[in-house]
Image (cartoon, rainbow, N blue to C red):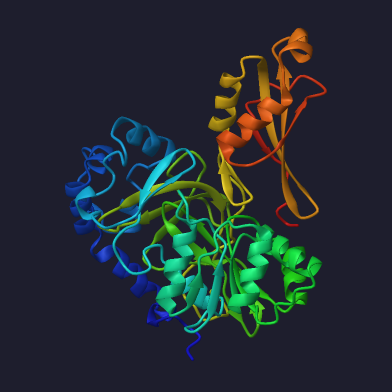
Amino acid sequence: MSEYFDELDTQEPRIRERGQFAKLSAHLKQAIANCPGLAKHLDGIDVSQINDLESLQALPVLRKSALMEAQSQFPPFGGFVNEQALDGCRVFMSPGPVWEPQVGMVDPWQAARALHAAGFRAGNRVHNTFSYHVTPGGFMLDEGARALGCSVFPSGTSSTDQQVETLKAFGANAFVGTPDYLKTVLARAAEQSVTLPELQRAMVSGGPLFPSMREEFSAQGIHVQQCYATADLGVIAYESCHDGQIQPGMVINEHLILEIVKTGTGDPVAPGEVGEIVVTRLHPDYPLVRFATGDMSAYIDEPSPCGRTARRIKGWMGRADQRTKVRGMFVDPVQIQSLVKTHTEIGAARLVITRNNDKDVMTLKINPVGAEAASSTLNCEEVASTLKKLTGLSGKVELAQAALPADGVVVDDQRELSG
């Protein structure tokens, strides 16, 4: 049984780069012809001259805010999708909102390679706890696992008790979901004295995998690796293993051109510098050119001991903006600003993200408009209900003990990623 997914895993880096750029200008011409939004974004640029990394870096960065604005003006996709090719495809909506199509191909989000690196193989029984509703998370890993020949139980976000019951009944030997939820399910199984001896490996994403959590999973006989993915681009990078040891950082997925740029610009970072991840994926139906993810990372220049030759990044190292993931869902400053507009009795608000007992905790700290509002019109329960409606996540609401500083911080992520 091969350690590698295919020959692309170990191809010479020069050959990989040459292949990426050989047809780049032709792909760009096709993309512009099919996607009027992208054509407008690249207006005035001679794409026939885009044939290497340096010329690619001359193109403007596409930020999610610009994509959202285009989608609001020309719904649902803002002209960035070849809608003629979407017949028979699924369509999703991620927080923002941002609309994304499922493009027509096997394993459209390129998850199979990452799952293979984590030890998933044909014949595995995979228990998938990512949501199959509205956002593409569940389908993303589902398509990749089935492309490998795995059987998948689409558990989605069912109750924890049902997760334990179906894990046992299905005899799943592989799990897919967020790190936090894997911990929750295992804890519930222990409470019920349910053993899951078949469960041997997991692929997690959508939240940080703290070292303490990985050690805890390993102590229960579960080998866990993680991948870095977004709803727009699919799996961008993934962990690899060599001689039973997880290797540092993450291997960049094939068929993607990943750059790390200085935050807020399109300029490349200096060697070793942390910057924002920008990705180009030239699928003919949904091309994304220099798409800024808002996530921060840095390159690892040394080749991976696992034998994979694609460049590595250090993994997720925070956000360039204040948008962050909580329990696998993105929370955006725009959502908090919308809450403040809804509750006119609130003068200022700051969402604080912390960890408690290995779980993410959201606390919305608020200043009322005036002293009278605190005692008369401000109802924290109603505000908490609005918070859950806007973000899809429950959180505490409390009056701040002092005036919140006017420093522009709306989402304050205080979690220690080094765990």
From the viewer's perspective, is 198 left or right of 129?
right
Q: Residue at x 16, y 48 (%)?
A: 33
Q: Nearer the viewer, residue 126 or 242?
A: 126
Q: Is residue 267 above or below residue 244?
A: above
* Rendered location of residue 120, percent (x, y): 53, 79
Q: In this view of the protein, can residue 302 be seen by the observer? A: no
Tell me if residue 303 comes above or below residue 83 in the rendering: below
| Residue 247 image-quadrant placement | bottom right
Tell me where residue 372 appears, x and y as whole percent. 76, 8
Q: Is residue 228 visible?
A: yes
Q: Quadrant of residue 254?
A: bottom left
**Residue in the picture at 78% in, 68% down:** 192
Vertical placement of 199 versus 253: above or below?
A: below
> x, y (%) of residue 359?
74, 52
Q: Residue 416: x percent and y percent?
A: 74, 50
Position of 193 with respect to 32 (left or right) is right
- In the rendered structure, the answer to whether residue 85 lies left or right of residue 367 reads left
What's the residue at 32%, 39% (across, down)? 76
State the count of labels. 0
Residue found at x 29% / y 62%: 104
* Residue that sits furthest to the bottom in the current view: 1
The quadrant of the rendering that contains the C terminus is bottom right
Return the residue nearer the eye: 153 or 414. 153
